[in-house]
Structures are given as structure tokens and as C-alpha cells.
Image: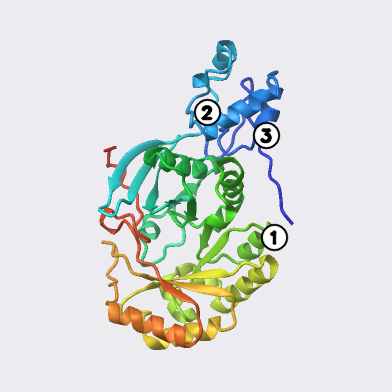
Amino acid sequence: MSVKSVPVLPSPKTSVVQQPNLSIPPLLGASLEELTGWVQQQGQPAYRGKQLHEWIYQKGVRSLSDISVFSKQWRAEVAEIPIGRSNIQYRSVAPDGTVKYLLQLSDDQIIECVGIPAEKRLTVCVSTQVGCPMACDFCATGKQGYKRNLGRHEIVDQVLTVQEDFQQRVSHVVFMGMGEPLLNTDHVIGSVKSLNQDVGIGQRNLTVSTVGIRDRIRQLAQHQLQVTLAVSLHAPNQALREQLIPSARSYPIEDLLAECREYVKITGRRVSFEYVLLAGVNDLPEHALELARHLRGFQSHVNLIPYNPITEADYKRPNENRIQAFVKVLKQQQIAVSVRYSRGLEADAACGQLRTNENKKES
């Protein structure tokens, strides 16, 4: 059953404390219904809610004082109420057209998002936390540590920022940037609904990734979203998974897969399993065979991701022969599989490479 969360929207005469440390919560992420209710609370006619919604989501306004259809008097009264937009601190373009952004938030924290263009589509990889607490051994973000969750508005803002910079509508969003989405479930679900209903991106074009947090996949299933669930597995057995993903020590792989099967049963949606191939670590034919035994009969798909190097770890990417041998074993075992070669490698914008560098300036 879907659970609806309605935020308390700000009044110009009140001060409401809401994470992250803002005296007044921002408007970005609020629905048309919520914005309409808010303008009416301020003594404005209901149609102002539709105008506000359009200026926030279609025109990308960054300050209420810039909404020219509002009266000068009311604009002055609400000028200090934040919409919730970030500033681009740094922008890096890879040869393949992928763009990495460092975004400065209202409390000066820095996050990353990535715009990935392709023919007839534009994908945004969004972050859900500042840093990440999962500490995966092969991931640059995990080496950085964790600071806080992102608010709903800070997730939606990343998509609007990329859309504005590319001057092209975003068609797909993957929650695969900095952070563990299911440790920030409320704001992730809120942002999914806003991206769908307010920005206009179909839920089937949204992918939520997770390393696997006990009971959180089951909770996500209860919302009956049409998003794709991507589970970062990265190993075919518990011992190896614990070596690569420290949090796996408290969540056995058998329990994780059982919860994934329950997700399929509840939602009718298949699960995508992400598997980073690390040369000589988890890329042998016997690893592929062991993985296949876990997934046989499972409504799922395996995304193999050849490792993207980072300076903080000594892992290597397997050669193409090793990659294709792994693929061959899975296909022989009737496991749906594909290889995902990450975009943005030269700009440190590929899978597992996201990190913030607060010394970088906008370019």
C-alpha cells in the first residue's frame, strides 16, 4: 500500500526546522496540491499554486522574488523563503559527452551528479547522501565517509540542474550516485514521486540502487512503485561479499536474495543485480557458476560492470576475454546478462568513481 508523506510547507511568518539545518524548508519537491494549499494559507488565490508549480519545475526559477506573475508586495513578503536550488561549483566534460557536476548545497556541503547523454535520451545519475556510510572497498565515495542524508529537494534539484545545463529534457534517472538510497528512504521515495508527477519522468525510467539494507527492500516494495530496483551484489558468496562490502557482515547474501524474491512477488517487477568485475577477485568462471546457482529461476537481470579504477584502491579491470568468459557461463546457465561499460571514465564520473573535491572551482 502506498504511503503518502505531506511536508509542512513554510509560512513567511514562521520558522520551521527541517533537515538539512534550514530554518525554513524549501518548496522544491512539493506537489501541485501541496503548493496550492500553501499559497492559499498565505491568503493567495488557488490558481497561484499552479503558477508557482510551473515556475519551479518548468521555468527553473531560483527565487520567489523572480516570479513576475506574482504581485511585487507578495514577492517581497516571501522573498526569503527558499526554493531549494544548488549552485554548480565545478563542471567537467568527458570526451564521450558525459558531464560531472560538483553542486554546492545551502549548508556548503558538496555532492556530485552526472549527466549522461545518448541518442534520444538524457540520463542523470543522482546522489542521495553527502558521502556514503557503506564503505565499499572498491568505491571512491565509500572511501570518503558519510556526512548526512539529502533532502527531497536536493535530489530533485540535481535533475533540474542537468536538464537546464544540457537544455534538454531528462528522460531517465538512476539513483546510483553518492550514498545508499535505502538509508534515506523517505526522501528518495518523495523525490521519485516528484520526478514522476512534477518533472514528468516516467517511473519505469527511474532506477533505485542499493547495496542491500535489511528490511528496506521489503519496505520499498510496499509503495508499489514502478521503478527498477538495482541491487549491488558484486560477489557470489557471503565471504567474498563481506570482503568487498563491510555492511554485508550483518546481512547474509541468502537473506538479501530472499528479500529480493519477495520484492518480485509483491511488485511484479524484476530485480537488476549489479556486479562489478574485479580482475582476479570475483571474475572467474567458478564465480559466474556460483552466481548462476543463486539466481536460477529468479525474475532478474545481471548487469556486469568492468571495474572503473580509483586511486584509493589497487583493484584492476579484467581484460575483455575474462569478461566475455564470465558472460558465457551465465548465458549457458540461462541467466539474463549484459555488460555495462560506464560512461564518463575520463572525467572520474563513471560508476564507483564519484567523490567530492571541495577545492575545485566552477569551469
From the viewer's perspective, is residue 162 above or below residue 1? above
**Is 53 situated left or right of 334 in this image?**
right
CA distance separating discs 3 and 2: 16 Å
**Figure quadrant of residue 73:** top right
Q: Which residue, as the protein is rendered here, is positioned at the far right? A: 1
In space, the residues marked 2 and 1 are separated at their CA atoms by 32 Å
Q: Secondary structure at mark 3?
A: helix
Which residue occupies 58% across, 79% down?
254
Q: Quadrant of the C terminus?
A: top left
Mark 2, secondary structure of its residue: loop
Residue for badge 3: 34
Residue beneath disc 2: 82
Task: Classify 10 Å Cα crowding around label 1: few (below 14), some (14-19), many (20 and above).
Answer: some
Residue assigned mark 1: 222
Q: Nearer the viewer, mark 3 or mark 2?
A: 3
- Which residue is at a point 29% across and 71% down the rendered structure image? 315
Please tell me which residue lies in front, 335 or 313.
335
Q: Answer with mark 3 or mark 2, whichever residue precedes in sequence.
A: 3
Mark 1 and mark 3: span between their CA atoms? 23 Å
Sequence-first tag of 1 and 3: 3
Residue type, numbered disc 1: Gln
- Circle nearer the N terminus (2, 1): 2
Query: What residue type is disc 3 on?
Result: Glu
Q: Quadrant of residue 326?
A: bottom left
| Residue 235 spot, x, y in % from top left | 44, 77
| Residue at left offset 36%, top offset 59% | 143
How many marks overall?
3
Residue pictured at 61% horizontal, 37% vertical: 30
Q: What amino acid type is highlighted by mark number 2?
A: Pro
Q: Secondary structure at mark 1?
A: helix
